[in-house]
Image (cartoon, rainbow, N blue to C red):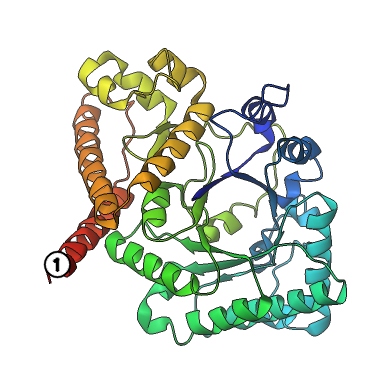
């Protein structure tokens, strides 16, 4: 069964209480299969761990050790973690045996001390076969294996394979993917989280997505693969063989680790409000700003295509959608996963995705036309939809030709 892993923020505790049945009602239809929190939140939001433990939901702590690769402001909350450092670490720094062992030991112990159900091995973002970070990643995994064995720690281990989209292309596999696969296998993991940046972007997102799914298939020979930070590509990733996907709620629905690093360079403002969450629109398979949904409310035909049709999720239509957008996002994503899994034949599953992408692209085009009259409607990025349609069309046609032969 494919799993939905949801990234929980510090402002999601009340939501978590509701969906996990913290008051004795039992976990409801919005309860995710797993939750993950950023490492810097774990010490400050211990209730997230407690709620997950009471509900029997696995809880992961993302160490986000790729932040070591960029300058972090000294006042940033991540930089205060025991394995973190505000200064930029070079590959030479992290290939020092003493340093790599220290990062691994403190990172693993931090996750265990704060209630993680599984260990996410320290990881870095790899963008080239020759810049040294591939060697750092292999060293981190080797050190993790040694530490777990020496300390006799017997918990599930997850390897995050984080890379830029260029390294997904098959010609790079001998230099990057194959060494990584060997390193993952030696680590002895129960799961692989594939975090590839900017898969749905660029001039040829369909090719990037095809490469992503091919890489997933290669890594799945070792262990089940979760599509990490791939909310906009969640369904197509599962159709392509992923064991599930991870996403934020109305935020962080796509992976771009390079941007995530640079965002922490400036001094944090404790009084600055977080950016507004988007409202998940199942028909587009992504979240859009709330003001977009409000702006199209006067167009009944368009609103009818955007509104959640599930009475169990949004019984009051627009009011429910806007009033509790986070619960709606969780229910909608879980429902879509279940619908995809219920399809018995792969060709039918790809046909469903292709048909859905066609409808979504038509809706995006109508929203773009309406935006010319109403600038409150934001532009919809259709890269993920175009990629999904192209890949789904390719797979269903290939399956049809194979059957005919």
Hey, which residue is sitting farthest left in the picture?
A: 404
Q: Could you tell me which residue is drawn at 52 percent across and 31 percent down? A: 276
Is 212 or 205 nearer to us in this picture?
A: 212
Q: Are there few (<14), some (14-19), or many (20+) residues within 10 Å of tag 1?
A: few
Residue 66, image quadrant = bottom right
Residue 204, image quadrant = bottom left
Q: Could you tell me which residue is drawn at 72 percent across and 22 percent down? A: 24
Position of 289 relative to 294 (above/below): below
Instruction: Look at the image and tell me whether residue 314 can be seen.
Output: yes
Residue 166 placement, left or right of 219: left
Q: Position of residue 378 (x, y in %)?
A: 34, 33
Q: Position of residue 9 (x, y in %)?
A: 65, 39
Residue 177 placement, left or right of 169: right
Q: Position of residue 57 (x, y in %)?
A: 67, 42
Number of dots carrying numbers: 1
Q: Which residue is mark 1?
A: 401
Q: Could you tell me which residue is drawn at 71 percent across and 36 percent down? A: 55
Q: Position of residue 392 (x, y in %)?
A: 25, 56
Is 383 or 53 nearer to us in this picture?
A: 53
Residue 345, image quadrant = bottom left
């Amino acid at each position: 069964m494919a799993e939905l892993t949801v990234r929980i923020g510090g402002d999601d505790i009340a939501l978590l209480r509701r969906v996990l049945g913290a008051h004795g009602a039992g976990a409801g239809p919005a309860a995710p299969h797993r939750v993950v929190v950023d490492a810097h939140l774990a010490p400050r939001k211990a209730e997230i761990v407690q709620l997950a433990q009471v509900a029997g939901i696995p809880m992961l702590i993302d160490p986000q050790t790729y932040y070591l690769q960029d300058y972090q402001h000294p006042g940033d909350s991540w930089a205060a973690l025991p394995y973190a450092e505000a200064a930029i670490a070079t590959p030479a720094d992290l290939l020092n045996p003493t340093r790599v062992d220290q990062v691994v030991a403190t990172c693993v112990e931090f996750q265990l001390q704060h209630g993680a159900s599984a260990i996410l091995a320290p990881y870095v973002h790899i963008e080239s076969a020759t810049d040294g970070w591939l060697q750092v990643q292999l060293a981190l995994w080797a050190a993790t294996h040694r530490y777990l064995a020496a300390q006799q720690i017997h918990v599930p281990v997850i390897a995050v394979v984080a890379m830029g989209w260029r390294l997904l292309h098959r010609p790079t596999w001998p230099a990057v993917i194959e060494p990584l696969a060997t390193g993952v296998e030696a680590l002895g993991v129960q799961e692989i989280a594939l975090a590839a940046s900017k898969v749905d972007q660029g001039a040829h997102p369909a090719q990037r997505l095809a490469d992503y799914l091919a890489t997933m298939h290669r890594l799945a020979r070792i262990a089940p693969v979760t599509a990490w930070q791939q909310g906009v590509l969640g369904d197509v990733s599962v159709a392509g063989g992923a064991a599930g996907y991870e996403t934020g709620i109305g935020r962080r629905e796509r992976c771009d680790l390079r941007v995530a690093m640079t965002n922490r360079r400036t001094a944090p403002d404790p009084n600055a409000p977080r950016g507004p969450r988007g409202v998940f629109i199942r028909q587009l398979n992504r979240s859009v700003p709330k003001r977009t949904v409000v702006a199209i409310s006067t167009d009944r035909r368009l609103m009818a295509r955007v509104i959640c049709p599930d009475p169990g999720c949004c019984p009051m239509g627009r009011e429910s959608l806007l009033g509790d957008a986070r619960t709606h996002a969780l229910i909608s994503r879980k429902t879509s996963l279940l619908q995809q899994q219920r399809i018995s034949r792969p060709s039918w599953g790809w046909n469903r995705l292709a048909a859905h992408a066609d409808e979504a692209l038509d809706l995006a085009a109508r929203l773009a036309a309406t935006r010319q009259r109403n600038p409150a409607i934001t532009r919809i990025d259709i890269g993920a939809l175009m990629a999904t349609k192209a890949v789904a069309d390719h797979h269903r046609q290939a399956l049809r030709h194979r059957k005919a032969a």
